[in-house]
Image (cartoon, helix red, strand yellow):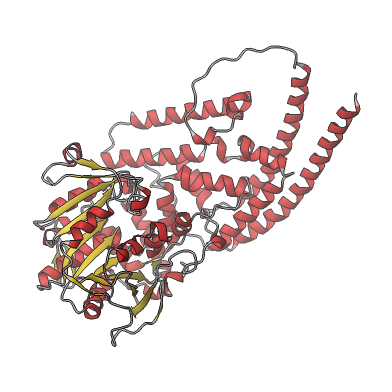
Amino acid sequence: MTTTDKSIEASSAEQIDQLKENLVRVEHLSKRLIEVLAQKKGHNPGLDAPNQELFARAASSYWAAMAQNPTRLLEQQVQYWGKSVQNFAEAQQAMAQTLAAAQNEEGETTERPAVNDRRFANPMWETNPYFRFLRDQYLTNAEAIRTAVDEVEDLDRVDRQRLGYFADQIINMMAPTNFLATNPDALEKALETDGQSLIDGLENLVADLEANDGELIVRLADENAFEIGHNIATTPGEVVYRNRMMELIQYHPTTETVHETPIVLFPPWINKFYILDLKEKNSLIKWITDQGYSLFVVSWINPNSDYADVGMEDYIEEGFLKAIEVAKEISGTKQVNAVGYCIAGTTLSLTLSLLKQRGDKSVKSATFFTALTDFSDQGDFTPFLQNDFVDAIEAEIGEDGIMPHYIMARTFSFLRANDLVYGPAIRSYMMGETPPAFDLLYWNGDGANLPGKMAVQYLRGLCQDNKFVTDGFELFGHTLHVRDVDVPLMAITCETDHIAAWKQCYRGVQQMGSRSKSFVVSQSGHIAGIVNPVSRNKYGHYVNADLSLDADDWMEGAEFTEGSWWPRWEAWLKKRSGKQVPARVPGAHKSYPVLEQAPGNYVRAKARG
């Protein structure tokens, strides 16, 4: 044996010893982890899995048990991690010796079709026989499961969709990349760092559990990289009105004159409004003010259990109607142009029906961003909008009177599980990486609770019973109906939106009573299709004036335009915004002095019970 060989052997032995020491530290961290999990409040088990009659009882029970009570499984997993890394280190040493002995022998390779799956990008999935077998067998199993689901008979459309969804969840969960012993990236990182990556991963895991009261929600962005009002949500403005439901922000004008009719923008209250003001270069809020408009934006309260009895009617009365009233008074106008995004677009439709029945013409035009009004086809949310899940949500609400933010966060995330759950979990918990400093993902993790009453009204009355387009939705002693939405309107939808599919939005717009309707489909999804700045020239959009067509025919005959839909909307809005008047400065109206600078106080509140 040469001196070099002895040096390599000694170095390898030292690395394994260091690895073992770090794994002892992992054991200590695992105890801390178990303590965190022991403090978990728990939630209704019906939120973790569908009714077991839908598919195999064993698979459903395993998934629910893992999500509901992960303590025992995680304790076993930590011990398993340590043994797996040691096994991998020893196997690598043995393989290196074997390869060295055979280094002069020529081997033959067989061309194989490429696997187009980002999870298997590491070359070892192809070059290492062990990992290649795991990958190929996993993909074979996945195909077999999906084929079996497709061939199931005697199921209606809803049950078939649910079965397919939950089968996919199990397939995604069981990917070899999700387990340390079968993830070459994580194993290599553990060896390179002498196990430090596992320690860092456990630290990340504990931090995520502590941040969410024991519920496991993977942190997607580095929260220390952003500060609301400092490097995110920075467009100048002032809070000019506040009540228990919302703060109303009036943004500073950037032009000497503005259009007479102000814009009142209602963002969703499931998330925070600053998705429209992440940074200057992609801020729709700043862009609107730069086009010469007086802009008012609602920032909703992040409710706690004190808001248990707040319903849709409170959001309409103390949010929509009050914001419109204040904007009219400050602007000295009789009308506003209203914009509603996502659930706020749905609620804007309810508000417009109410205003029509009251004979109130305060809204001159309405713009809807990815807003559903007809829920007859629930799209990707079908698995979650059936009675077993909604019953469980109601039971969960009954505890504290609110729908906890993590329920919605988890629902949205599992619609794209590999991108928003497993991929980030692997990087954070197995690789020990700090989440990226990505503003969009930071916003995505800054969720909000929902008042219990409002959540049930929305889920039962609108999503499940679809009352707004059928028998009518009862509020304020009125029967509100989509046909009452008769103001000039433009609906902006997104081609790959998995939350508010454009075809579903289209069906609702078709039923609105307005004689002046414009419909736009932007490329990309629920967020990127809306936050689509002109300067990037990234996503184009489709338009077709004939809304009598069904959705497929509408798209087939649509005209495609390169670039953002923002200028098209502004040209449409300008015609409905009146003459130029001197720019309005926040705080100039004596009845509405400046309360504080934008983005205000409500947006800073974190979701807690």
Q: Residue at x 32, y 40 (%)?
A: 161
On the rendered image, what quadrant is the N terminus found in? top right
Q: Residue at x 29, y 60 (%)?
A: 343
Residue 375 x, y percent position in the rendering? 23, 52
Asked if one can make out residue 243 in the rendered structure from this viewpoint, the answer is no
Q: Residue furthest front?
A: 256
Q: Position of residue 450 (x, y in %)?
A: 37, 65
Question: At 49% across and 47% down in the image, what residue appears?
Answer: 421
Q: Is residue 417 above or below residue 32?
A: above
Q: Residue 332, percent across and down?
A: 20, 79
Classify 316 as above or below 499: below
Residue 582 pos. (x, y %): 24, 76
Hey, which quadrant is residue 284 in on the image?
Answer: bottom left
Residue 407 seen anywhere in this rendered image of the structure: yes
Q: How many marks?
A: 0
Judged left or right of residue 543, residue 32 is: right
Residue sitting at the far bottom: 590
Q: Nearer the viewer, residue 17 or 152?
A: 17
Tell me what residue is drawn at x 51 percent, y 44 percent: 422
Q: Is residue 208 left or right of 93 when viewed as pictured?
A: left
Q: Nearer the viewer, residue 517 or 332?
A: 332
56 horizontally vs 16: left or right: left
